[in-house]
Image (spheres, rainbow, N blue to C red):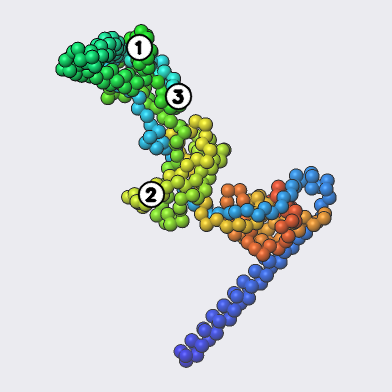
Amino acid sequence: MKRLLYILLASMLFESCNKDKVQQETNQARDAAEVSAKLQAVELSSQQIKEMGIQFTQLVRQEVSEWIEVSGQVMPPPESLIQVGTRIPGYVRNLQLVEGQHVQKGQVLFYIESLEFIDMQRRYLTLLADLQQLESAYKREQALLELDVNARKTFEQTNAAYRKTLAEKKALEAQLELLGVNPTEIAQGSMKKSLPVRAAHSAVVTKILVTEGTYVQPQQPVLELLDERHVHIELTVFEKDLPKVQRGQKVRLVLAAVPNDTLHAEVFEVNAKLNADRSTNVHAHFKKAPEHPLVGSYVQAWIAVAPRVAWVLPEEAVVYDNGQAYVWRKQGIRLEPLAVQLMRSGRGEVALQEPLPFSPQDSIVSTGAFRLLAIFRNAGEEE
C-alpha cells in the first residue's frame, strides 16, 4: 500500500514539473515574440529624422583595451621639491614673495645682507693688490737670478709667496662664483653690501619659512619651491590587478579639481613591493601635463591593459532590450534594429564582436537610438 502511494506521489510531482517546464518555455517564446514584434524596421522621412534629432555614424577600426580603474594623486619626485637657502649667514632682505607665486629661472627671490659677504669682497680686493705686487717682485727676482746677481733662495721665497697668494685668489673666486657673484665686477670696484639669491629653475613658491629681517645660517632653508615640470601621477593598484600592469601602458585620468577634462599619461614604473593593504604604487608620467597641476590633487584613472584592434561605435549608438544589445542600421529610408554582441565597453565607446551582422560601411544611428527604442516600447504597450 505504501509503495503504491509513493508511486502516485512521484507521478504527480513529475507531471507538475513538466507543466512548469512547458509554461516556462511558453513564457520565453511569448517574450521573444514580443521583443521581435517591438523591434522591427521602421520607415522615416528625412524631415522626420531631422525633427527627431537622429544622427548617424560609421564603425571605426581602432585599438581597444580592457581598463583597470584605479585612483591616486599628483605627486612631485624628490628632486622637484627645492629648498632655497643661503651659503653665508646674514639677514633676509626684500622678501616680497607669496605662496603660490610663480618665479622664473634667474629671478631674484630675496637678498642676504651679510658682513661676511662684505669681508669676502674686501679680502678679494686685498689679494688682488698683494698679487700684483708679488707678481712684480717675482719677475724682478727671476730676472736677477738669470743674471746671477741675486741668490736662488731669495727667488724661491718670492716665488712661494706669489704662488700662495695666487692660490688664495683662485679659491676666493670659486667661493664668490658659488654665491653667484662675478669676481670681475668686484675687481672693477663694484662692491655689494647684500647678496642676491636667485631661482635656479622656473618654479612655484610652495612655502615661505622665514620673515623679512630674519637672521639665517647656511643650513637654514628660507623658501620651498616646486618645479612643476616633473610632477607625476602616483596610482594605487591592488594585488589582483598587478599582473596586468606593465611599463608603457596608456593611462586616462581626470583630476578631482578639473573633472570635465580627460588627461593622458603612460605607466613609467611599477613598484614590485606590496603595502600592508596588498596594494602597490604605480608611477605614471603625463603625456602633456596641465599648466599648473595641483600637487596632492586626487585623480581617478584607468589603465589600458590587453589591447586589441576591433570595430568601435559610440556608446550611445547601442540600446538594450531584454538583455540583448541592438544597433539601428540605415537602409535607404528604413531603420533596421540589428542584434550585436559586445566585446567590451567603457569610456564612451563600445567594441563589437565579429562577425558583424552588417557592413562596416553602413550608417548606424548614433544620436537618437534610445529614442527609437522608447517609441517602439510605447507602441507595444498601447497595443
Residue 82 tag number: none
Q: Residue at x 35, y 16 (%)?
A: 183
Q: Residue at x 80, y 57 (%)?
A: 331
Q: Secondary structure at mark 1?
A: helix
Q: Which residue is mark 3?
A: 105
**Tag 1–tag 2 contact (CB < 8 Å):** no
The reply to whether residue 72 is in sight is: no
Residue type for callout 3:
Lys
Residue type for callout 1:
Ile
Residue type for callout 2:
Asn
- Label 3: few (<14), some (14–19) or many (≥20) C-alpha neighbours in 10 Å: few
- Identify which residue, 125 or 129, lies in the foreground: 129
Quadrant of the rendered structure where residue 223 is?
top left
Badge 1 or badge 2: first in the primary sequence: 1
In this picture, is 299 found above or below 363? above
Observer-side mark, 1 or 2, equals 1
Observer-side mark, 3 or 2, equals 3
Q: Residue at x 71, y 52 (%)?
A: 58
Q: Which residue is mark 2?
A: 271
Q: x, y (%) of residue 53?
A: 75, 44
In this picture, is 220 found above or below 232? above
- Identify which residue, 231 or 236, lies in the foreground: 231
Observer-side mark, 3 or 1, equals 1
Furthest-bottom residue in view?
1
| Cα–Cα gap, marks 3 and 2 | 33 Å
Badge 3 or badge 1: first in the primary sequence: 3
Furthest-front residue in view?
147
Q: Which residue is mark 1?
A: 186
- Label 1: few (<14), some (14–19) or many (≥20) C-alpha neighbours in 10 Å: some
Q: Secondary structure at mark 2?
A: loop
Q: Residue at x 15, y 17 (%)?
A: 153
